[in-house]
Structures are given as structure tokens and as C-alpha cells.
Image: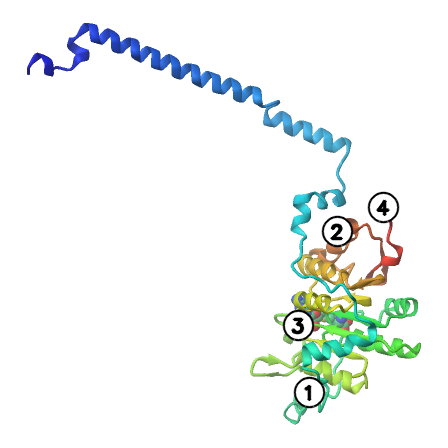
Amino acid sequence: MKEDQRPLHLHNPQRNKLSITKLFTHTTAYVIIVLLSYTLGYLSHSSPPQQQQQQLLQLSQLNPPSVFQLANLPSQLDNFRVTTHCSNSPLPPHLVFPTVLDRVFNGSSPYTNFPPPYLRSFLKQKRIKGWGSDGAVFENLIKRVKPRVIIEVGTFLGASALHMVNLTRKIGLQTQILCLDDFRGWPGFRDRFKDINTINGDVLLLQQFMQNVVYFNATRSVLPVPFSTASGLQKLCEWGITADLIEIDAGHDFISAWGDINRAYRILRPGGVIFGHDYFTAADNRGVRRAVNLFAQINNLKIKTDGQHWVIDTALAIQI
Ligand SMILES: C[S@@+](CC[C@H](N)C(=O)[O-])C[C@H]1O[C@@H](n2cnc3c(N)ncnc32)[C@H](O)[C@@H]1O
């Protein structure tokens, strides 16, 4: 190997010295930069995370935020946003049925020529079953509110809806009742209702409900709205349909009850009453009660109970 081809750091002492100095300078600069960044980072944090958490905890203990405040933080409120724009002009009560007939049933009554011949042998003349469907709450509220429009969210075979027809008739009201239900029941409900027939996998719940309405001569007072509660309530809102009295009795888990109550509240006439079943039931991990309580807390409303039902009367809303 020639001299000038040898590695410099081994055999050229002067150059070696230079490289060592260079290396030292680089390392020192590097160490200084690291130290500086660390110091700056340290200084820019007023307190370490643990200390901050402690401070926050102490603050919230001194002045705990209410659910109302939490829900009104801009980021939280954003989670409550809805896509539907409700109509700005609520329909007068006498236009509620014509609007639903027009929008849902192409302008003709679903009861016309009902039941069709092919269905007759599959339906009972009347088949009613409900849960707490004739509790005193119905009479108490109908007498007090004197509703022109009632919306029932969760109808099944119509036990509570038909009870409300009787009550309104008794005091001479001409109330219109919309029954919002997908009329599918719930998975497995036929284990208990084997006598409700199916045709090609389609359970005849809507048809049996309509037959019950026909049997009780209530076709002028009761109209089914056969959709999911979520999409149905949204549409009613868009069409400008509002109600004086709204009963919530569909899904009983927290998320279903929460969605139904919030959506229904948007179509409650100011000063109207929203109420529902199963406030005390332990079913679905007390989903109904948790949803009602949270809703009332956030909206600063008062809950009353009547039998197994919860009642929120917006005429009694606490003003803040
Ligand atoms: C407990 S029953 C209603 C009973 C009725 N209120 C009575 O007392 O006679 C519940 C009803 O809610 C309906 N339902 C449940 N979840 C629903 C949803 N997401 N959309 C539409 N209907 C639903 C079911 O089809 C069922 O008919």
C-alpha cells in the first residue's frame, strides 16, 4: 500500500489532531443543543402532567361542572348536532293526517278495503296485548293536555293507542294519533306471540294492528307511520308535524331511548308533554331511566312519575 493511500487517522498525526478537535467541537455542540432543548421544554411546561392533573382535580372539586355545562362545551355540543332541519312552520293539527297520508301512503288511506281477501284468514278479528297500556297516566295527561295531536313512539298491537282513542272520545276531543313503529317487534318476540302470523318471513304485526284499529272503529283517529323511530321522527320534524302529547315506548336500551326522546322532543309543541313507559324497570340495565334522567338534566327539565311512567311537562320547565 502506498503512503498516500493509508488511512489518515492512523498515520498522519497532524491531521489526526485536527479531526479530534473537529469531533470534539461537534460533540460539544450536539450536547449543548440537547441540553438547551431540554431546558426550553422544561421551562415551557408550567407544571408536570401529574401536577396539572392534580390541579385540575382540585379545581373541579371546588366547582364541579354540571352535566349541562359539560354538554354545552363547544366540542361536546358538536356531538349533539343533527342533520335534519325541522320545518320552520309547524302544521296546524287539521293538516297532520292529510300530510302523513300524502307523504307516506301516496294520498290514499291504508284502511281502504282493509283487510284484503288474501290476508283475512291470517288475522284475528282483534288481538290486543300491551304493557301498562291503560295506566292512569293516560287519562291524567289527556284530561290535562287535551291534545289535538298525539304521537306514540312504539305501538305494537295498539293497546295504548286504542286506550287513548277511548279516553279522548270520552271527553269529546277529536284527537289525531300517529303510531310510529316499524311493526317488526323485536328479535324473538314471536316466541311469545306465536299466533301472529308471518307470510314469507314477513310478520303481520302492522296488519294485525290495523285490523285492531278497524275493529275499534278508530280509523279516523289513528294512523300508522311504519318506519324506524329514528327515520320517522326525523321526517315528521321535516314535514312540520308537531304534537301536544308524545309517548315514548319503543326500544328500552339507553341508546334507543336516548335517541327517541331527543328526536321526539324536537317535535313536541312548546308547552307539551312527553312521557314514556318503563321508568322503573330493570330491563336493559335501566336504559330508559338513565336516558330520561340525562335528558332532563341537560335540558333543565323536571321529571315526574305516574305509575310505571315518567312524565316531562315542558310547561313546568325550570327557566335558568
Ligand atoms: C313495548 S312495544 C310498544 C307497546 C305499546 N306502547 C303498548 O303499550 O301497547 C315496543 C314497540 O316498539 C317497536 N320498536 C322498537 N324499536 C323500534 C325502532 N327502532 N323503530 C321502530 N319501532 C321500534 C317494536 O316494534 C314494538 O312494537
Q: Are marks 3 and 1 in contact (CB under 8 Å)?
A: no
Looking at marks 1 and 2 on the same chain, the residue that comes earlier in the sequence is marked by 1
Give the class, few, some or many, for how many residues have Cα within 10 Å of label 3's Cα (few <14, many ≥20): some
Disc 3 marks a residue whose amino acid type is Phe
Residue 79 visible in this rendered orientation of the protein: yes
Which SS class for mark 1? loop
Name the one closer to the observer, 188 or 208. 208
Q: Which of marks 1 and 2 is in front?
A: 2
Question: Which residue was labeled with disc 3?
Answer: 227
Q: Which mark is residue 320?
A: 4
Q: How far apart are marks 2 and 4 (CA)?
A: 17 Å
Q: In which quarter of the image is residue 170?
A: bottom right
Question: Within 10 Å of the Cα at label 1, are there few (<14), some (14-19), or many (20+) other Cα atoms?
Answer: some
Residue 51 at what x, y percent from top left?
63, 25
Identify the image quadrant of residue 109.
bottom right
**Label 2: which residue?**
294
- Disc 3 residue: CB within 8 Å of ligand 1: yes
Residue type at mark 2: give it.
Answer: Leu
Mark 2 and mark 3: span between their CA atoms?
Answer: 26 Å
Residue indicated by mark 1: 123
Query: Amino acid type of disc 4?
Result: Ile
Q: Residue 58 carries which label?
A: none
Q: Residues within 10 Å of mark 2 (few under 14, many from 20)?
A: some
Q: Which residue occupies the foreground of this view, 303 or 283? A: 303
Measured in 3D between alpha carbons, the distance from the residue under mark 3 to the one under mark 1, in whole angstroms, is 21 Å
Spot occupied by residue 50 in the image (x, y as percentages of width and height) = 61, 27
User: Would residue 12 be found to the left or right of residue 150 on screen?
Assistant: left
Marked residue nearer the N-terminal end (3 or 1)? 1
In the depicted structure, whether residue 314 falls above or below residue 104: above
At label 1, the amino acid type is Leu
